[in-house]
Image (tube, helix red, strand yellow):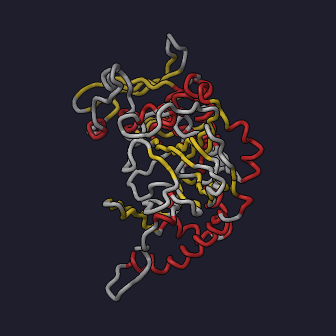
Amino acid sequence: MSLVSHSNQEISIMLNHHLVNFKAAFLRDACRDPSSVDPNNKQKLFTTAEAAAGLTIEAPPKVIEDPVTKELKLCVEWHNNGKIKKSEYPASLLEKYSTIKSRRVDKFFDQERKLWDRDEIESNFAKLEVDYEDFLNNEEALSKTLHNLNKYGLAFVNNIPEPTLKAMNEENAYQWPVASLASRFGYIKKTFYGTLFDVKNEKTDAKNIANTSVYLPLHMDLLYYESPPGLQLLHFLKNSTIGGENVFCDSFLAANYVKQKDPEAYKALTEIPITYHYDNNNEHYYYKRPLIVEDQDVSTVTKDFPPIEAVNYSPPFQGPLEVGISIREDSTEKEISEFHKFDHFLRGLSLFEEFINDSKNHFEIKMKEGSCVIFENRRALHSRKSFSDANGGDRWLMGTYVDSDSFRSKLRISKRT
């Protein structure tokens, strides 16, 4: 590392054979010494606006070797808000913030994610399984599961002991195995279903299609929430009916298919929001979001994974569309533009459904009793085939949710060790 030039607005350095220009305000704001960031609570002690106010460089910056770590560091003496402030920046810190790719490396692990179809999951299924006791008590098993969820959005836990309790309620919710599994990721996301929820075949007056025996199409859960859950866990306590196989599909692969087949239709799927709602049982939830949510930074990290942050698809809980459906003589330019994009949106939606309804893109499994599937709710579409209890069989699942924030936090920490 070497200094190239500096001004009150920018500092330029040579870093690993690349010329990197940093904004001076960024460097001042990124200072991590004890007067800038509390060493105990790790919280910043000033605002960005304060750091940038009247910022000048008091003396020419220097690059020196740290006598302890032997790492090169950039030393800058600032004049900021009438005070002199000395800051030091290790080469490793500057390298971390020199590109979009390097800024994401220890946060998102995009390069480890992989698109999948039926053959990919079937050939790697054994790698996606862990034992219940191992998962609860072994950090390596937890790390493996975190890796699988980041890579595929799917993981499976086996050999779950039969619960001693006979009925679940809010008072005993944390005594059930699925709560123990979810708590390994962080806090359980309580919803209007409760801390946990039962999935049983309710023969009359079911308030949710999941609690019936009819075919449940591919979907995602709680898209009518402002912040839908990141992970869903389903523990199969009883699963001896005829049929009822579970089906999973990679929505990111489907979105990528649309992008390759019809870029204009794909773009419309990122712009025209779909209405999701739950208006039943004295509850009314509502939210609009596009089918595909992009994160353009992903493409700077890996060319093998599409720039998709999340997919939102849940026909059973879809309300009437509200964007692009009509215009009047007094409509805004935005409304007129959305109206003209609507046909592209429908074309994209048709391509998306064509892909997800193709069985070669389905991973189908009859879950064993005493097993649990964990899946990324904003990526892995899930479905259940119709079933019958004509054989005297029974079906009882217990589920819960975890926010993406908790899951991603655990993943980041696991990558450090």
Residue at 71 percent of width and 36 percent of height? 127
**Is residue 301 positioned above or below 67 on the image?**
below
In this rendering, is residue 381 above or below 230? Answer: below
Q: Residue furthest top?
A: 68
Residue closer to the observer: 62 or 263: 263
Residue 415 placement (x, y as % from top left): 57, 29
- Nearer to me, 257 or 38: 257
Would you say residue 304 is visible in this rendering? no
Q: Quadrant of the N terminus?
A: top right
Q: Nearer the viewer, residue 142 or 80?
A: 142
Q: Is residue 408 left or right of residue 286?
A: right
Residue 177, percent from left and from top: 51, 33
344 relative to 58 in the view: left or right:
right
- Exactly how many numbered labels are in the figure? 0
Percent coordinates x, y for residue 39 in the rendering: 35, 20
> In the rendered image, is residue 169 in sight?
yes
Give the quadrant of residue 244: bottom right
In this rendered view, identify the residue nearer to me: 173 or 116. 173
Q: Residue at x 24, y 27 (%)?
A: 83
Q: Quadrant of the C terminus?
A: top right
Coordinates of residue 343 in the picture (x, y in percent): 54, 79
Residue 416: quadrant of the picture: top right
Task: Look at 42% across and 33% down and name the residue there.
Answer: 174
Residue farthest bottom in this picture = 329
Residue projecting furthest to the left? 82
Seen at 72% across and 47% down, the residue is: 121
